[in-house]
Image (spheres, grey):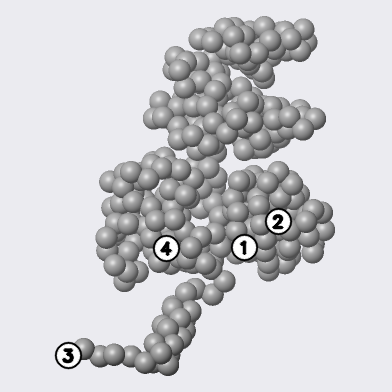
Amino acid sequence: MRYILSRAGIYRLVVVTAIFMFILLPVGRAWAAYPVLSLGSRGDAVAQLQQALKNQGYYTYWQVTGYYGPITRDAVMKFQKAKGLTVDGIAGPVTQSVLYGSQNGYRILKFGMRGDDVSRLQSALKQQGYFYANVTGYYGKITENAVIAFQKAKGLRIDGIAGPQTQSVLYGGGQVTSQQSTSRGAASSQKESDDLFWLARIIHAEAAGEPYIGKVAVGSVIMNRVNSPGFPNTIYGVIFQYYNGIPQFSPVQDGTIYNTPSDESYRAAHEAYSGSKPVGDALYFFNPAKASGSWIVKNRIYVATIGNHAFYR
């Protein structure tokens, strides 16, 4: 039997459907902000998904890879089953909304991202005197520096990333609470995971075609800078340091820092992070085939050449 709706009936149906969808949507969060992620997907959105699943015990692989393979799919299925969602192994808008909503309702925000939540972050930082530019909804260098300044002032981990804890303190006001302080043991493991992720990224971007020892050497330089008073005290800070408006590392300028690191780059990152120093206390390196490195050659002491990179201290 066929039913024919009048124009008024169609209008009422559309309105009811819209209201129903509005009720289902999480408050303050646009599902359209979440891309559909499935087997074969790659990128920052996948890395963020893996980290969120890892934080909640569903993703148990030792590293965040940025690649949506069978391990990530199985982790998503476990999460979906636990939360009463459709178990299909695909991280669509609904799955991600529930996942990130269970992380204090805050999406992890970092350099290069856009959205209403970035605008909200900028507005909150502006109200508290850390952000002095126009609210744009784009997480650029000015926003990153504002987040770093806020983190320093509030005793948070200084990485320039507005994660759940940073946003919770920002929107809630005050310093880190005693409850948050007691959870730092758990946060330290996340910090190490984040550190290794970014260290592997810079190693891969700078030395993907280099021998393994050359990869470790690049990672060692980053670690030496972290431990030197003349540079930022975090891996992320060292990688994204600018001098006179110019990034210290070319992969930051050309965008290759965001490529997915190889397994070998991760192994090299672990070795450098653990203290391996194949080039001693070197703080600088450059590829003579791509850059003159004249300032380094004139002002620093040569240590060694490994693969295509010359290292100086």
Q: Tell me the residue at 52%/67% (across/down).
A: 30
Q: Which mark is residue 116?
A: 1
Crowding near the residue tagged with mark 4, few <14, some 14–19, many ≥20 C-alpha atoms within 10 Å: some
Task: Check the image and report above or below for 135 versus 1.
Answer: above
Q: Which mark is residue 93?
A: 4
Q: Which mark is residue 1?
A: 3
Q: Tell me the residue at 61%/13% (across/down).
A: 290
Task: Check the image and report above or below for 224 versus 196.
Answer: above
Q: Tell me the residue at 66%/52% (across/down).
A: 138
Q: CA distance from mark 4 to mark 3?
A: 36 Å
- Residue position for label 2: 136
In-image side of 156 versus 21 (left or right) = right
Crowding near the residue tagged with mark 2, few <14, some 14–19, many ≥20 C-alpha atoms within 10 Å: some
Callout 1 amino acid: Asp
Callout 2 amino acid: Thr
The answer to whether any part of residue 182 appears in the image is no
